Structure formats: C-alpha cells, structure tokens
Image: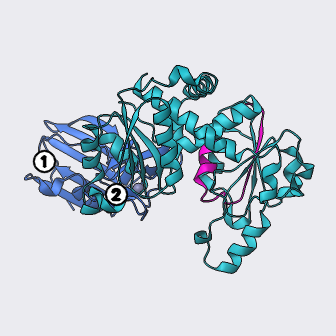
Chain colours: A blue, B cyan
Amino acid sequence: MNIDSIKNGIVLDHLTPGKGMEVYRLLGLDRLDCHIAIIKNAPSRKMGKKDIIKIADDIALDTEVLGYICPGATVNIIKDGKNVEKKKMSLPEKLVNVVTCHNPRCITTTEQELPQIFALTDHERAEYRCIYCETLAKN
Amino acid sequence: MRSVIDIKELSVSEIDELVSVAKDIIANPEKYAHKCEGKKLATLFFEPSTRTRLSFEAAMYELGGNVLSMASAASSSASKGESVADTAQVISCYADIIAMRHPKEGAPMVAAMNASIPVINAGDGGHNHPTQTLADLLTISREKGRFDNLTVGFCGDLKFGRTVHSLISAMERYEGVKFVLISPDELTVPDYVKRELDKKGIPYVETTDLTAVMPELDILYMTRVQQERFFNEEDYLRLRDSYILTPEKLENAKSDMIVMHPLPRVNEISVAVDRDPRACYFKQVLNGKYMRMALILKLLGL
Ligand SMILES: [Zn+2]
C-alpha cells in the first residue's frame, strides 16, 4: 500500500497497532478540517506491525497523551518534505479527560462537569492515579 | 491560598512547627485566646460527623474566632444540586477559612481548587482525614517525646483503615521507625502501601498474632473492624473478636507503650483498658483540638 509522503505536516509514527483510531479521536483530529491518513497495521521492522497517522497540514497539536496511549510513539514534524524534528514520546505527568475514574465514591461520579484528571504516580510501573480520590487508572 | 487536603502535603518541618505551636497553646492558652478575633470558620459538613465538627468549632472559639455552620446537609444547597465548586466560591464570600467533610472522595480538593480562602479537609469518605493524623502525631510527640526510633504497631482493619495509611505515610519519614502490621489475612495493608515502604527501605513485618508482637511495640494503634467490609456476618464476628485489646493482652507490653485509637470504638478495646495509664485514645481527642487550632492559625497566617 502506498500513501503519499507529505510535504508539510506531522507524522505520528510507531503507534501501537490498533490504537490509531483512538489516537485520532483523543487528539481531536476528528474535529479538524485537514487532510489526514490513518494507516493501520503497517509492517514495522521494530514492532512487527504499527499504526501511523499522517496529517498534511502545519497545525499546532498537543501530542502529550500519545506517550500514555502508545508508549514508544514518535512525533515527526515535516517541513518542505524533510523530517525536521523527531520526538520520542514519554509518559505524560498528567492525563486530562483521557481515562475515567471508576471509583463509585469519587467526587467525579456525582459532579460530571469536573475534568477527569489523572497524575503519574509511579514512573516505573506507569501508574496513574485519579487526583481526586487516588484510585488507580485501569487500562 | 494554602489548603490542607492530604497529610502528605505537609513537610516534616511544617509538622514540627504545628506540633510546637500546639504545645505552646497548651502551655499558654491565654496567649492565643484572641488570635482569631474577627475571623470566621465555616464548617461545611455534607455528612454528619458531630465529633469532628465540634472539635473544629471548639478550636475556633478557643482562638477567639467565630463559626458559621451549615444546619444540615439535607437542607443545604448541595441537595438542590449545587456543585462543590460553586459552594466553595459562595462560602469564600462569607468566611475566612473552611473545614469541609464530604462523603465523596476528593470533594474537599475540588473545594480548595475553587475557594479563595483556605480549605481544611475534615474527612472525605474513606479517603483522607489529615487532622486526625495531626491529632495522632501530637499524641505521639507528647507521650513519647519523639517521632524517630519507634516501633509502631497497627492492629485491626489495615486494608480500608485510612487513619492507618495516613499515619504510616507521616511516620515513615522519620529515622529508625519500624512498623508492625497486625491484621487478619482478609484485612492486610494494600500492596501499594507496602511497595512504598519497600522502595524507601523502611522495615515492617506483617502478622496475625497481636500477643506475640506486643513486647516489641512502642505504640499500638488499634482500629475498628467495620461490618460493611464483609460479605457475611460470620466472618465479621470471627475477625472482630480476634483483635480485641484486653488488660490480659497488655500484660507483656512495654510499661511505656501507648495505646491509640481514632475513635469511636465498638468493642476492639475493652473498657477495662481505659484505666491503664498507657491508654491514650481520649488524649488523642483533646490533642485533635489543639492541632486544629495550630492549623487554623497557620493557614490564616496568624
Ligand atoms: Zn477518582
């Protein structure tokens, strides 16, 4: 399968296979009016398979959450057909409205307008806890 | 504006400072009798806890301040659907400091994020209760004269007992502290608490046998085993009764060991123990008031 390489834009590479659509929604790409390709299960030497998202537009994009959804993901900035910046994503300190707290005693269950915020509490174990009730995030 | 939601937010030196202010209040109450004149504490209790509310109110009155108290949760705006965030902003217009108790975990944190005055967490469900831990710490300091080099035993429900987890996280910061965790297998300390202790290299032992470890302890912290933690009554009754402290069990304890309990007790400490000079649980109640006084002063910058 051949998908045009882009001239100016962003390539989200090394996404965990099968996570492409989730990333698409979480980054709010579904609300953008630009040229986007989602490639699922592309062959990868390192990963066997991977998902890729190509955005053919020079937009400002907060990609922090990628480090949580797809550990090992890379963000590549393409300018004039050249990869000018390659960033390997690491675990973000905070997740806002990414995971939902499942503790029935948590304040977020009765006050649903509160943002769902989880903070990284154990780097080695990649553990996130609800900032309100400290319940562990479920994957 | 600084709030206190979780005991872990207070540093060792801040705790030392609160303890020394509390001791100064005990020694010189007249010096503090007018410190909070013109200041108002709002006690917002969204679930009943008369003893905690009275402790906060007594603390504020003894500092010469005033108290605004919500009549009851049922008649409050919360039952009309007002959010914690809105309530916090409204009360900020009337009071100088808030003490909040709420059945939902994290509610006082939401209040603190939205209030323009300090918020003290007076208990959020089974989650945090920092002023209880401050009461425990003042009791330890007054009775043992130190926080370091102590062997602290916790007995009863160590799985859900929030006072236990909070006191462990406060005490683990001191040199030479060792924990003895005494509970039935069903109610042991959660893994994440043990992982923290392992990571910091803090010694602890787990056991089901209270009598066997008694001679080692400098502090015995008893907790309530609550019926709602069990699926059937048989298990509850069996476990509850196996961890009752009696004068006989205290016979091989150190003569200067102290017995603590966050109260209210059900039957886990027999009434006969009350006469033992090592029983400190009623002193904890009084110490709770002094620490709340010290905390109010600190948060109001007085
Ligand atoms: Zn939560």
Write the residue at 73% across / 65% down. Answer: B185
Determine which quarter of the picture holds residue A10.
top left
Dot 1 lies on which element? loop
Q: Is A90 contained in the magenta span?
A: no
Q: Percent position (x, y) of residue A34? A: 9, 51
Q: Position of residue B32 (x, y in %)?
A: 51, 23
Which image quadrant is residue B11 in?
top right
Q: Amino acid at mark 1?
A: Ala
Identified at 34% across, 33% down, the residue is B96
Quadrant of the image for the C terminus of chain B?
top left
Residue B205, compared with residue B27, is above or below; it is: below
- Which of these two is toward me, A109 or A54? A109
Q: Amino acid at mark 2?
A: Thr
Magenta highlight range: B147-168
Q: Which residue is mark 2?
A: A108
Q: Is residue B288 left or right of residue B185?
A: left
Q: Give x and y (percent) for residue B18.
A: 56, 27
Query: In terms of image quadrants, where is residue B243?
Result: bottom right
Quadrant in which the N terminus of chain B is drawn = top left
Q: Nearer the viewer, residue B194 or A46?
A: B194
Q: Quadrant of ligand 1?
A: bottom left
Q: Is mark 2 within 8 Å of ligand 1?
A: yes
Q: Which residue is mark 1?
A: A56
Regarding residue B198, the answer to whether it shows in the image is no
- 3D distance between C-alphas at marks 1 and 2: 38 Å
Q: Chain of mark 1?
A: A
